[in-house]
Amino acid sequence: MQVYLDNNATTMCDPQVVKLMTPYFSEFYGNPNSLHRFGTSVHPALSNAIDQVYTALNASDNDDIVFTSCATESNNWVLKSVFNDYIVNGDKDHIITTEVEHPSILSTCKWLEEEGVKVTYLPVNEQGVVEPHVVKSFITEKTALVSVMWASNETGAIFPIKKIGDICKEAGVLFHSDAVQAVGKIPVDLQSVNIDFVSMSAHKFHGPKGVGALYIKDSQALTPLLHGGEHMGGRRSGTLNVPLIVGMGKAIELATVNILDTMAKIRTKRDRLEDALSKISDTFVVGDRKNRTPNTILISIRGVEGESMLWDLNNGSIGASTGSACASEDLEANTVMLAIGADNELAHTGIRLSLSRFTTDVEIDYVISHFEKAVDRLRGISSSFAKQQPTAGGEVQECELH
């Protein structure tokens, strides 16, 4: 059996999405900016995909949704253009983000610091989320932007986006959220929150890789990241990738049409897996499951290196992760666990398991069995665990590290 539990890294493209995309590679292949029938023939499919994204996110007709190559591009676009528009050519000098953002946010912020921008990296609490009052306390009259993820890619923790949005609106500060781990997993209603920019990627909700989007509230001005043409109303240059955009539209429709029912089914499987693994002694699950995306578990197993556990799981044809796939070649301690107060040893033991709507009960049973055997084997050869006094198992231990 093969079991894929790394759906926060990427997801299988839904077969319905693949089927819908296929004709636009070699049958309806015209450039949508061309005036002849080969170009205009793809317009209905593009319009439908755009409508599907607007509907799924409950965006207003006054808002812009611009297709990009991925959320990394969208994140870079917001940060670098706010830098240009409000710092280089304005009177601001400050950006606020958190310590646990995706590398596409953190690395861009580090670059901005080299350009002279003052960046505040907010700490998170023991549940792995930033508290609204902390955001408010760091906003100054020089703050141009607050950028806070909607949900954590590593823990699944859901951030208080609505409250932070209200704080930013009251302060007159732009607010951006990387919603890659939220869109398609939990309801995202863009008319219910005060937010200026939202990034997303199709491959996180069973769409194709290579396409994402940026939501821009009220079609407000934002200097383009890419120049060279009048595509997407002049917002993003580059020939529109029709097959992928069509795929993204269908994928987000499928992911959101019955999202509450889908969430409940995934959560039931996730909780069963989490309960079983938490019975293993000296295991810690990060974050309150009630405030996590329904598919995600970040569990630490004391005495078991995360990379060793991944190897053992991989040998059993189980795909998992130690954290963000975009930083998976970096074998340093898990930055999120360090941020919530875990010691360096425990921060090396985190394993992320992320389910999807395609995960089956049979697969969960297989993972539970293999996981328990892997822990026994690895602890049996762990010199560090042998020196530790084991604790009693039998109950879920939500992570309360300081």
Image (spheres, grey):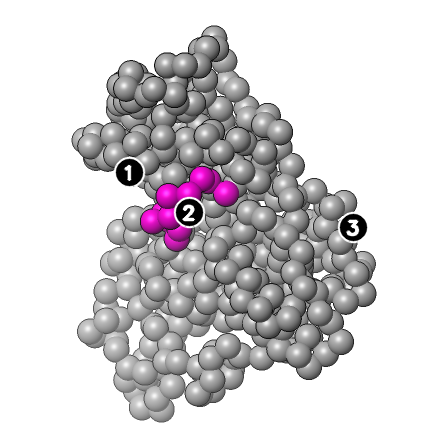
Distance from the alpha carbon under mark 2 to that under mark 1: 13 Å
Secondary structure of residue under mark 2: loop
Secondary structure of residue under mark 3: helix
Q: Residues within 10 Å of mark 2 (few under 14, many from 20)?
A: many
Residue 365, image x and y in percent? 29, 22
Residue at horizontal 49%, vertical 33%?
344
The residue mark sitting in front, 2 or 1, is 2
Residue 275 found in image quarter: top left
Type of residue at label 2?
A: Ser
Type of residue at label 3?
A: Ser
Q: Earlier in the sequence, mark 2 or mark 1?
A: 1
Q: Look at the image and tell me in which quarter the N terminus lies.
A: top left
Residue 384 showing in the rendered view: yes
Q: For mark 2, what is the residue?
A: 324
Q: Is residue 333 magenta?
A: yes
Type of residue at label 1?
A: Gly
Residue 106, image x and y in percent? 53, 57
Q: Main secondary structure of the magenta part?
A: loop
Secondary structure of residue under mark 1: strand
Residue at horizontal 40%, vertical 51%?
327
Residue at horizontal 28%, vertical 19%?
381
Q: Earlier in the sequence, mark 1 or mark 3?
A: 3
Residue 163, image x and y in percent? 72, 48
Magenta highlight range: 324-335
Q: For mark 1, what is the residue?
A: 319
Q: For mark 3, what is the residue?
A: 137
Side of 169 where 88 appears, left or right? left
The answer to whether 43 is drawn above or below residue 283 in the figure is below
Q: Residues within 10 Å of mark 1 (few under 14, many from 20)?
A: many
Distance from the alpha carbon under mark 1 to that under mark 3: 41 Å
